C-alpha cells in the first residue's frame, strides 16, 4: 500500500508541475469565461468583449497546436525589466510579426486587467484560454503618474494591480487591436 501511495503522489506531483491549474471555487461566477473568447489556431485569441487580440503564451513560451483542436504553451515564460519589456514588440514586429500580424504591443493596465479571472487564483486567469500562464506579475505599458520611476503591473497570482520600480523583472504578454 505504501508503494501505491508514494507512486500516486509522485505521479500527481509530476502532473501539477507540468500544468498548474488555477483554483476556481464553483460558487463564484467567472469574469472571463471561455465563451468570451474567439480562439484562433495560430497562438492568438480575441477577447470578444474588448475586441483585443492576445498572444496565448507569455513571452518565452512556445505555442503548439495539439490534436483534436487542443493547443498548449510550453517552456518557461521569461522575465524582463520594464525597458526591455517595451522593446519586445519592436523585435517581434520587425522580425516578421507573430501569427501574421506586426502591430503587437505591451498592453496598458486596463487591457491587462481585462483578462484577469477574478473567480480564480494561482493563476487568476482563464487557464483554458491562457494555459500555463505563470501566477506571477506581468508588465503593463502604463506609467505611474505620481511616481515616474514606477510602472503599473498585474499579479496573475491573485489579479491585483500595483506599481513597481521599472528595474524589477516581470513577465510579458503582447496584445493588439483586432480589426
Image (cartoon, helix red, strand yellow):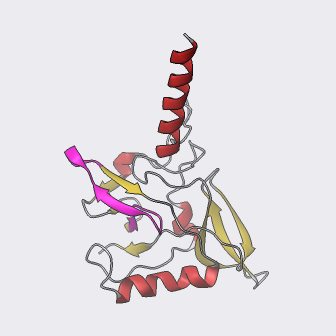
Q: Which residue is at the far left? A: 68
Front residue of 119/93: it is: 93
Dividing the image into 4 quarters, which one contains the C terminus?
bottom left
* Residue 19 visible somewhere in the drawing: no
Residue at 39% from the left image edge and 51% from the top image edge: 129
Is 56 magenta? The answer is yes
Residue 64 in which image quadrant: bottom left
Q: Which residue is at the far front? A: 3
Residue at 37% from the left image edge and 51% from the top image edge: 36
Q: Which residue is at the far top? A: 1
User: Could you tell me how many numbered marks the image carries?
Assistant: 0
Residue 11: percent from the left, percent from the top? 48, 30
Up the image or down, 147 lies above or below 156; here it is: below
Up the image or down, 159 lies above or below 79; here it is: above
Residue 69: percent from the left, percent from the top? 23, 48
* Residue 117 visible somewhere in the drawing: yes
Residue at 53% from the left image edge and 30% from the top image edge: 10
Residue 139: percent from the left, percent from the top? 60, 71
Q: Which residues, given as a range, are shown in magenta?
A: 53-70
Residue 117: percent from the left, percent from the top? 53, 49
Residue 144 in which image quadrant: bottom right
Dividing the image into 4 quarters, which one contains the N terminus?
top right
Is 155 magenta? The answer is no
Residue at 46% from the left image edge and 79% from the top image edge: 105
Q: Is residue 142 left or right of residue 89?
A: right
Front residue of 120/166: it is: 166
Amino acid at each position: 500500500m505504501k508503494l501505491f501511495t508514494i507512486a500516486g503522489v509522485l505521479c500527481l506531483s509530476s502532473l501539477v508541475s507540468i500544468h498548474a491549474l488555477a483554483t476556481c471555487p464553483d460558487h463564484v461566477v467567472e469574469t472571463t469565461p471561455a465563451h468570451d473568447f474567439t480562439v484562433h489556431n495560430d497562438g492568438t485569441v480575441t477577447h470578444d468583449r474588448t475586441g483585443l487580440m492576445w498572444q496565448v503564451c507569455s513571452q518565452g513560451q512556445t505555442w503548439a497546436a495539439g490534436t483534436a483542436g487542443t493547443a498548449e504553451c510550453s517552456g518557461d515564460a521569461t522575465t524582463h525589466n520594464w525597458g526591455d519589456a517595451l522593446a519586445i514588440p519592436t523585435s517581434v514586429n520587425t522580425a516578421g510579426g507573430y501569427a501574421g500580424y506586426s502591430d503587437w504591443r505591451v498592453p496598458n493596465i486596463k487591457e491587462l486587467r481585462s483578462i484577469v479571472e477574478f473567480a480564480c487564483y494561482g493563476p487568476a486567469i482563464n487557464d483554458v484560454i491562457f494555459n500555463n500562464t505563470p501566477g506571477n506579475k506581468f508588465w503593463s505599458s502604463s506609467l505611474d503618474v505620481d511616481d515616474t520611476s514606477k510602472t503599473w503591473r498585474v499579479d496573475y497570482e491573485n489579479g491585483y494591480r500595483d506599481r513597481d520600480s521599472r528595474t524589477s523583472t516581470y513577465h510579458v504578454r503582447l496584445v493588439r487591436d483586432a480589426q
